[in-house]
Image (tube, rainbow, N blue to C red):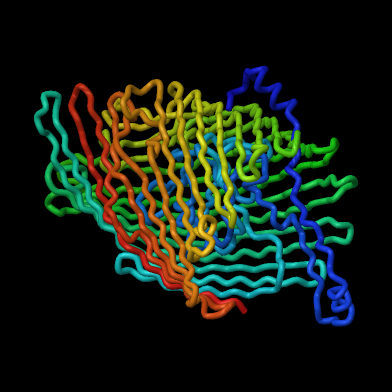
Amino acid sequence: MQSKNLSLRPTILSLAIMAAFSQPAMAQQATPVKPESAEKTEKTDPKIQKVEVQGARNYDERRQDTATKIVVTQEDIVRYGDTTVSEVMKRLPGVTMGGVQGRGGDIRMRGLGAGYTQIMLNGEPSPPGFSLDSLSPDMIERIEVIRAATAELSTQSIAGSINIVLKKSVQTAQKELKAGLFEDGGKFGENLSYQVSDKSGRMSYALSGNLNRGQYERPSYSDEVGTDANGKPNLLRHTDSLGWGTFTNVGFSPRVNWNLENGDTVTTQSFINANRFVGNNRDSSTGTPSTYASDNQQIQSDATMLRTNLNWIHKLADSAKLDFKLGANYNKRTSDVGLLGYNVNKTQILDRKSTSGGTDKGITMSGKYSAPFVENHSFVFGWDGAYSKRSETREQTDKVTDPDNKLIAIPLNEDFTADVTRLALFAQDEWNVTKQWSVYGGLRWEGLDTRSQGNTFNEVHNKSSVWSPILQTLYKLPDSKNDQIRLGITRTYKAPDTSRLIPRRSISNNNSATSPDYTGNPNLKPELAWGLDMAYEHYLPGGGMLSASVFMRRIDDITRTDLSQDANGKWVAMPVNSGQATTKGIELEAKLPLKAIMADAPAIDFRANLSFNWSDLSTVPGPNNRLDSQTPISANLGIDYKFDKLPLTVGGNASFQDGGPVRISVAQSSYSVPKRVLDFYALWKFDAKTNLRVSIGNALHQDNINASTYSDSKGTIHQTNTTPTTVAARVMFEHKF
């Protein structure tokens, strides 16, 4: 993305504008000629129904679309009985999870998070304050992992996009109930989901709801070691932490479809979600004194989310159509936090009360016109826009009773508002040049305008825009029906989110070089990237597939975190634009039903993926100057086995995410240990409508360990954080009525 001015490379722009393309033709199956006896039977026996074979239903998006994507079906999504979307994500090809294993975290492609990976819902960027874990996996029709950008979707996707497509159409009347229990670290919970769908004339509808409730208890500890400029120890501290509490999540989602007499369709879909979290955290330190020798924190937070969409598809002459969408979303959050701080004599020295609240309100509008103006071409022209308004308030009062007068009260009374406006225009074409060769080209302009103001900072206005030319091509090797090659050239960007632009200061309880305060930077510019994607795909009988792909991104105006001390000696972290980065990688994937290579083999399916990622930042000295703590190696291996004589299917998945050292700046570095996760499941089918699913998550329960170091001419501080993890067990009863 580029601020205000953008210089387009003529060659790339010409290719993007001139390239024309249409969707590959769908293979239609020929209607077989029926024998004369069969025709007589059909006429004389009214009970025999006529079956129509439609080739479009067998359309394989991944294999036949010119634009590259990986499609994860609903069957794969619910296989392990996951109750949240983030649990599903960790097993997808090329996708990794930040944070502690088994507890979710930021979703990453190519090992990159922090906004490099775009999360979308039904083709639209997820709204502010929206959490994917508020969705039940049962509501999802498919997940699309989009490695190379397209003009129709937002190009704020340097690493790629993950599009969550929710169920819309209703094929048959159905009712389904799922009830389950789960245990995690000795704490129990329950989840319940219900879906009902039916058709009435030209209208069909579906209602779904879910409830998740549980408890948790999570210990952790940290160690800090410091030396002065001469290497003499001056810091040695150990801190034990324990967090515990409860959580409740309730969701409801209705959707209605109308098929109008003129061939138009109208669809409305809504989400209503509410959750409550009540937690406690206790820290206790020994060794070198800190601000608090111990503290107790109590938190209660509530969040409510409403999102609704209306989609109208109008059919025009000559197979053209108009697709219009209108949406609105509302999100409200409140939080009450109490903090009690104690000195080494166990005397209370601080009583802090903090109350905060925020709302996000927004509307989205989009439309596109598609028509085959020229044979073997499919042109699409469209636009999409969004407006959102965020409001936040925070009040904090401190009651200090420090006998040593070292602790200073930090009263806060702040509020701010932020308005974000986005507008995009795009054009694209898909062209079947020959039976073996298809080309996709597109051009997208997208602009962002962010305005914020508050009582603790001056008004901030940030405006930027980007032109994104895109070229992708698919070539099917003429001597093979199962081999094909892909190539893509893209222009993508990463815009700074609102929280990084607003110069509000977040205060650390124990300020240090490894635990600093944080403030936003209103002068941040977008990061801009040119990208290259190449892939080779080989398809096997029975749905098997082998794939090898490579990618490269060159990113300008990279954003990294700068650490400095203010006039009062407090450490402050702030995002800044700094230099250029290059990231590249190799991704391997395999799906192999054993019967694809052995006709009499048992019903065993293998799934595997392996990714290698490299990156470096020009303004940070190496080695290990990886971008955004990028995951260097990740892998998944999954096996499913269906018994012949039992209604039982079992399977497992092993995942690996490498860690290692990262150089953040001249003075800062970090380290994380590799993460290993092992999951199992078993599915017993009592009949066609009743199942029992048992699953074990994070069977290895490996400790999560990460460390950070700050070193300059004054000395060195090293902090290590260790978080034990637990095994999670789930039992789910599923029944269709």
Q: Position of residue 339 (x, y in %)?
A: 30, 53
Q: In which quadrant of the rendered view does residue 696 lie? A: bottom left
Q: Nearer the viewer, residue 437 or 714?
A: 437
Residue found at x 9% / y 29%: 232
Confirm whether residue 249 shows in the render: no
Q: Is residue 282 left or right of residue 685?
A: left
Give whichever of 617, 209 is nearer the camera: 617
Residue ID at (43%, 27%)? 576
Say which quarter of the image contains residue 8: top right
Residue 168 place in picture, x, y as percent: 68, 60
Give the position of the N terminus as an image quadrant.
top right
The correct choice, above or below, for 260 with respect to 552 in the image is below
Q: Quadrant of the C terminus?
A: bottom right
Can you say whether 716 is above or below 192 in the image? above
Residue 580 is situated, as x and y percent measured from the top left of the image, at 46, 22
- Specify the quadrant of the image occupied by residue 651: bottom left
Residue at x 40%, y 26% (from the top left corner): 616
